[in-house]
Image (cartoon, coloured by chain):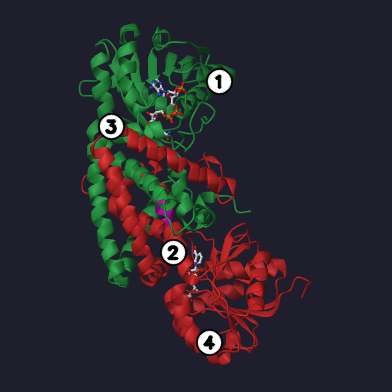
Chain colours: A green, B red
Amino acid sequence: MTSKTLFNRMALIGVGLIGSSIARAAKLQGAVGSIVATARSPETRRRVAELGIADQVVESNAAAVEGADLVIVCIPVGACGPVAQEIGPYLAPGAIVSDVGSVKGSVVRDMSPHLPSNVHFVPAHPVAGTEYSGPDAGFAELFVNRWCILTPPEGTDPSATEKLAAFWSLLGANVETMSPEHHDLVLAVTSHLPHLIAYTIVGTADELQNVTRSEVLKFSAGGFRDFTRIAASDPTMWRDIFVANKDAVLEMLGRFNEDISALTRAIRNGDGNTLFEHFTRTRAIRRGIVQIGQDSPAPDFGRPHP
Amino acid sequence: MTSKTLFNRMALIGVGLIGSSIARAAKLQGAVGSIVATARSPETRRRVAELGIADQVVESNAAAVEGADLVIVCIPVGACGPVAQEIGPYLAPGAIVSDVGSVKGSVVRDMSPHLPSNVHFVPAHPVAGTEYSGPDAGFAELFVNRWCILTPPEGTDPSATEKLAAFWSLLGANVETMSPEHHDLVLAVTSHLPHLIAYTIVGTADELQNVTRSEVLKFSAGGFRDFTRIAASDPTMWRDIFVANKDAVLEMLGRFNEDISALTRAIRNGDGNTLFEHFTRTRAIRRGIVQIGQDSPAPDFGRPHP
Ligand SMILES: NC(=O)c1ccc[n+]([C@@H]2O[C@H](COP(=O)([O-])OP(=O)(O)OC[C@H]3O[C@@H](n4cnc5c(N)ncnc54)[C@H](OP(=O)(O)O)[C@@H]3O)[C@@H](O)[C@H]2O)c1
Ligand SMILES: NC(=O)c1ccc[n+]([C@@H]2O[C@H](COP(=O)([O-])OP(=O)(O)OC[C@H]3O[C@@H](n4cnc5c(N)ncnc54)[C@H](OP(=O)(O)O)[C@@H]3O)[C@@H](O)[C@H]2O)c1
């Protein structure tokens, strides 16, 4: 325990990229007294114990939450409902229950009904990640200077929201609060649509008859390889996201389709001015992202050049 | 002059990212006896002289090519025709004339008619670059372990093609030869379509009413920021590419649209299996690219994490 300790006992349900990064960061920062973790498979539980990133590894979700004043569910969004149902009866009165799911409307809808009224439910989404999964992929710095969005349902005790905000700040994140619906719209454009498009184009490139896969790989440095990183993300997680955030994703897809039709028309008509004008506007966005420290100004993201 | 010297005098017309990288790499490797450079604007010529990356900086394209046994035109593809017309009369007999344009069919069509029959025209495209432009953006290692595609027109003297291939190999590149038409199809999928899609989605995100620009920037680490790098590339260069490679780009866009419709349908129907199956297949491509050394396996391309 240090003066920074915010919770006595944190339970992590699911210890993949996000869960294991929370464990590492919380330990590094002394944010919690102790960490108890569990995961679905014996392999992951064993690996978490080996890594030593939790103080205790237990075999069931129910055992994990007992006596915990902070519970964070770190599993694919489609699995959150059943887990809430499982842990509901074992939660300590006054505990804060949270998650890290990339969709918030569906998680609130799926988890809320199973949580007793004497706990505080404060859903969260740290907007940070990599293309890798599992407990070995996490690291303590993942959340530093990234945003964590909290979406407390109406009527949530503000002090519970503040306490979870303080936790995420201690892990290095900037915290913002918004409604689950607005979160899902914002993330549809900043995360879900980009992933869908990346998955699509990588699939398209792989199915051409007149260009071989070996050519696609060899000449990928022309731009394509940037998309393959995102399209290597975990299929289960992303399946769940698109199923859970269908409406917002379909709305953003509609906008995207209109815009790509307009640019297609400009290409077909050889309308260089329209293309030039569009390509000039989009540069400003990149500058803005680099300016606020959400990406590196180094060429090629700072990729190593031999 | 070293034992590696392949050409006595290399002329560079245009000294931006690519031209200045060639100058730096050729000097580092001792690939040429001397370098003469020119650029359209006095500012760029002055900067090139300051940087000391050429042995001589001259004011006109005609003056640059005189006495050069290697001439490389490093300017946007739409400008290649007029420049070929300008230099045609001044080229030394036996010189190799090349370019670095991202489209090859149009460059061959635009330049060939202006080149005298006593020079060797060997078009080239180094598949390497960053999102930055201008003589300061270049570096000697840009081409190392990247591919350079040569598209010699039928009837080209094979020894000229071999000599240019040796030059690019010395700069660190792997060299491949193919027809201009096939090049344009391959690059349409590995470079031009990705850029068009990135430019589109960045524009889409910037025009939403229900999500602010500040939200798009803040939460861009969810995936969107990867697209903004590509969409920050030079507008003139990319306008020219889409005008010049219209047919192949439209063909690839057609395929992409079919594929995105299929995934949209799966989302609309809540068809998780189709999504999962698609997302699983695309991972293999990433693995392939990393395996052949065309991208870094480091999470997030090796972006700095604080
Ligand atoms: N990756 C990102 O970039 C990112 C960013 C922000 C938020 N998120 C969100 O964070 C959550 C976890 O993502 P992650 O990247 O940490 O995933 P991950 O590395 O794949 O880890 C997932 C964890 O969930 C467990 N799990 C999977 N399916 C389950 C089920 N049906 N029931 C119970 N447990 C299950 C896994 O257990 P086993 O190991 O035993 O299989 C594993 O411990 C997801 O909701 C995701 O939307 C991800
Ligand atoms: N960037 C990449 O990633 C990449 C990769 C492979 C191939 N390429 C190809 O390489 C070529 C050059 O690209 P780059 O990235 O080096 O561009 P860059 O950094 O913008 O430099 C372009 C050069 O071309 C000159 N120029 C521009 N318009 C001209 C015109 N109308 N007439 C004569 N000169 C003109 C510029 O002169 P001023 O400076 O005086 O204006 C400058 O010296 C393009 O054909 C591009 O398709 C680019």
Q: Which mark is residue A244?
A: 3
Discs 2, 3: same chain: no
- Is B280 situated left or right of B161 in this image? left
Do callouts 4 and 3 mark residues in contact (Cβ within 8 Å)? no
Q: Residue furthest right?
A: B3
Label 2, on which residue?
Answer: B185
Q: Which mark is residue B190?
A: none
The three-letter amino acid code for the residue at tag 1 is Arg
Q: Position of residue B194 (x, y in %)?
A: 40, 56
The span from disc 1 to disc 4 (Cα, nearest Å) is 66 Å
Q: Which mark is residue B115?
A: 4
Q: Position of residue A48 (x, y in %)?
A: 53, 19
- Is A189 situated left or right of B293 in this image? left
Residue B155 is a magenta residue = no
The span from disc 4 to disc 3 (Cα, nearest Å) is 60 Å
Q: Residue furthest bottom?
A: B89
Residue ID at (64%, 75%): B54
Q: Secondary structure at mark 2?
A: helix
The three-letter amino acid code for the residue at tag 4 is Leu
Q: Position of residue A114 (x, y in %)?
A: 26, 14
Q: Secondary structure at mark 4?
A: loop
Q: Chain of mark 3?
A: A
